[in-house]
Amino acid sequence: MLSDQKLQERPEIPAALPSPLSSTRRLLLETATVFILGIFLTGYFTYPFLFQMNTHLVELGDSKFSTYVHSWVAHALLTQPRQLWNMNMFYPVKSTLACSENWFGDQLLFLPAFVVTRNPLLAHNLVIAGSFVLSLITMYLLIRILTGHLLAAALAGFIYAFAFPRLAILDHMQLLNLEWTPAVVLFLFLFLKSRRTRALAGLVIFLVLQILCSLYLGYLSILTAGCYFVGILIAWPRAITRQAIYKLALAGVVSGVLLLPVVLPYLRMEKAGTIDPAELFEMSIEASANPLSSYLEVAGFPNSIYTNLLKRFDSHQYGWEKRLFMGFIPMGLSLLGVFRLKSVADSDNEEQTIERALIFGSVLLIVSSYVLSLGPYLHIHDRVTHIGLPFLVLRNVIPGMGAFRVPARFGLAMIAGVAVLAGTGFRVIAEYCKRLPRANNGVKMLVFIALLIGISVEFNVAPYHFARVMDPAHVAPEYKWLAVQPAGSVTLELPTKEYLDPYQQAEYVFASVYHWQPLVNGYTSHPPAGYQKRFVQAANMPSPESIRAFQELGVRYAVVHRDKLSPQREDLWNKTWAGLSLVHAFGTTAIYRFEQVNSAAQRGNGSSLPHTRAAKVSMR
């Protein structure tokens, strides 16, 4: 048997993967293992989400709306691709998909699930669950491939996927899908290392895919890639050749060309005055992170171990957008990771050079995302000062940056930097463990497990409360009735308020996934210019003026939920009104038909309508 001294003198098995064939097989096996672990971890951190995916949503506003948008995109792609941008809401306005995010990238998961199950809830929730699993995988592969360190990669992937700021925004699905950003960074490094065209193609594919998931996330992804590019420039300057820069510029042009058909409808909508820059700027001031309290905020989650300790840091302005707590253990590991620069500072070894670039890029990403999250003006405990910040300049310089309503969301980009540095910090601990008397891999594994448990306790806020909503097996009879009416039967759902009530309108547009008739109703942060009068007319129904207005608009049916009417308004609906007749009653819901009028206004509106094909994709 070998002595302890000889055992210590034996060279360590290299962390980097050996031969191409064996490394590929090993990497595939590891990825499959990470995938399975990701499912279990997602189930644990989001409990009972995975058990209610086909009947429940995380909340009743944004979640209903995002289910509706995803369903419309899938429905249009399968039945009427030319009408993709003409969602059935806000009749008779065209290009209404441009009133919100389109989330085309999510169709990679949503569309197959929708085709197989015909359940929009299950498909939508699969996108959410998939964001956690895929985030774990892509961050794991980024660190594993570039550094070869398995446990550091696992820890980084764990933090990136299940960080508290991500678990705190289950109701903001559009902010969860940052799973492709680590792949963008990975292919950036692989291209600069190999100069291979396929690596550059991977960079373009994953960048475009990430931007298609959300324009918000596209900015975060570009910021992340830019920071790591600068990290490479600092630590690995010989990788940045003139030819490499030309090819990266070409990749940027190709990405822009591929995204142009998606961007143009938004530009047209902005030109039409739908987006008010002054209103967005005012909101961006209020929805900016506070320098300290936002990064210590866990408001709204009573199951967090820090709820009582950190409640003094709760924000009273857009607090749900400012829950950016990164965890004390991950932040401590990140600080420790910076000290690894001392170990790899003067090395010419390519692997350590890449690690240096990752450290520099992560530090830059943490600092830049933190500063940008503070918004245009510095906040002190929710009080706005007159001290201007970089966001104020960039919003006027970078195209589209002015539409960034919530600067605090830049804090989500920090998660990637913290995750990478935390993995590096674990390597520092692992190397220290080797120096301990009788050190072995068991000590390192115990430390790894202890860190996972500690971070899990910091991040975990389960169980969540999910709301039961109308699923394909329990569609309300009024919507089944609408589904069999002639396509293009324009519908108005009542009651409404004189303004766009998010929860009320989200319920109406969500219900339309079961009939796809054109809707006067609609829900978005950017309603079409001049559409406010429609809400006022709808709120005044059944006044003669409102009835006449909707007749001239070409509306065919009014679905009236009488149980939601005020007593005064219900008395009005008990009367007989010219131009309006009761055709069906389903419990407390009544359906009225507008008598059609032959007017120039009706013909004019009808000629510009987005024609929809109702109920061609059955969900029952």
Image: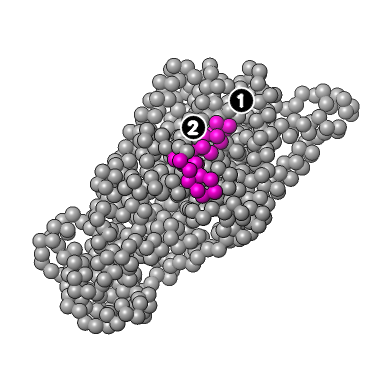
Nearer to the camera, 385 or 63: 385
Name the residue rendered at 68%, 29% in the picture: 339
Residue 349 position, x and y percent, is 64, 19
Q: Calculate the distance from the C-alpha at mark 2 to the C-alpha at mark 1.
A: 16 Å
Left or right of 569 on screen, residue 33 = right
Q: Secondary structure at mark 1?
A: helix
Residue 371 inside the magenta-drawn segment: yes
Residue 14: which quarter of the image? top right
Magenta stretch, residue numbers? 362-386
Residue type for callout 2: Ala
Residue type for callout 1: Arg
Colour approach in the figure: one colour
Residue assigned mark 1: 356
Residue 452 position, x and y percent, is 69, 46
Q: How would you rate the neighbour count of disc 1 (Cα within 10 Å): few for under 14, some for 14-19, many for 20 or more?
A: many
Residue assigned mark 2: 225
The image shows residue 425, relative to residue 114, as above or below, that is: above
Say if residue 433 shows up in the picture.
Answer: yes
Q: How many marks?
A: 2
Disc assigned to residue 63:
none
Name the residue rendered at 54%, 26% in the picture: 231
